[in-house]
Image (tube, rainbow, N blue to C red):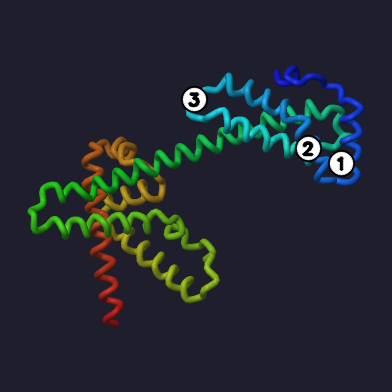
Amino acid sequence: MEKHLNQSNAPSVRDQELWHRFVASRDPAVRAQLIERYLGTAQKIAAYLYSRRRDSSIDFSDYLQYARVGLIEAVDRFNPAATASFDTYASYRIRGAILNGIRRYTEKSSQKAYRQTVLRERAESLRERAREAKSEEIFEDLVDTTIGLALGYILEDSSLWNAEETDRSSDPYQSLELKRLRERFALIVDALPERERTIIRYHYYEHMEFSMVAEIFGVSKGRVSQLHARALRLIREAFEHLERFQASC
């Protein structure tokens, strides 16, 4: 495939001289000359893979950038004594860099789309009551929605679900507070009714969207949304009660 993209697989005398100087000195100026020498190869491989792309959301400029990264890595890691042809070696490195870059880009896009979906679902779940609220209850509902979303961020922090995880903070007081927060939320979530507890675990710990949870439960997505809002309300009430109880002790 890519082996025919280069002008020649046989290194020129000039190329051999550059490689000899670079291996001996690791001179940045020689390195720059080698990279410049093979930029055309990187561009051809990027164009080849771009022409066979399946995802049209990624621009050619991204392919070219990944190819250049692969070329630089190839120049830095190539050993003329161990590998006969830099063209062959570089073609694999460049191709791998492009494919890895595309994979990471796709994963980030998927994570971003998931994040937008779950935030929209949570907000909608917490706004359902506000739609039917009387005018004097609107402000209270907005406060409840804000607090509910904040609770969601706390629950989503995986450290709350891993009691054995080593605290990253170097502040002993902060580490102690984080440990206490973990313990409180673990107790509260474990004490929720079964359906609400399962929804919290599926959505925040297993990162399932409401539609997937609905399929597991065999109910509508709207019903999962209602149970999610109820679970956050119960968590908030339990947390406030626990805080008051500990403050009075």
Q: Amino acid at mark 3?
A: Ser
Numbered circles on residues, count = 3
Q: Amino acid at mark 1?
A: Phe
Q: Is residue 53 left or right of residue 187?
A: right
Q: What residue does disc 1 label?
A: 22
Q: If you read the primary sequence from the N terminus, does the residue marked by circle 2 or circle 1 appear first?
A: 1
The quarter of the picture where the C terminus appears is bottom left
Q: Residues within 10 Å of mark 3 (few under 14, many from 20)?
A: few
Is label 3 in a helix, a strand or a loop? Answer: loop
Q: Is residue 32 above or below residue 43?
A: below
Distance between the Cα atoms at labels 2 and 3? 30 Å
Corner quadrant of residue 138: bottom left
Q: What residue does disc 2 label?
A: 75
- The residue under the point 45% across, 55% down is 158
Q: Amino acid at mark 2?
A: Val
**Which label was assigned to residue 57?**
none
Q: Is residue 21 left or right of residue 183?
A: right
Q: What residue does disc 3 label?
A: 56
Q: Is the Cβ of the residue at disc 2 closer than 8 Å to that at disc 1? A: yes
Q: Is residue 154 left or right of residue 88?
A: left
In depth, the one of 5 and 153 nearer the eye is 5
Distance between the Cα atoms at labels 2 and 1? 10 Å
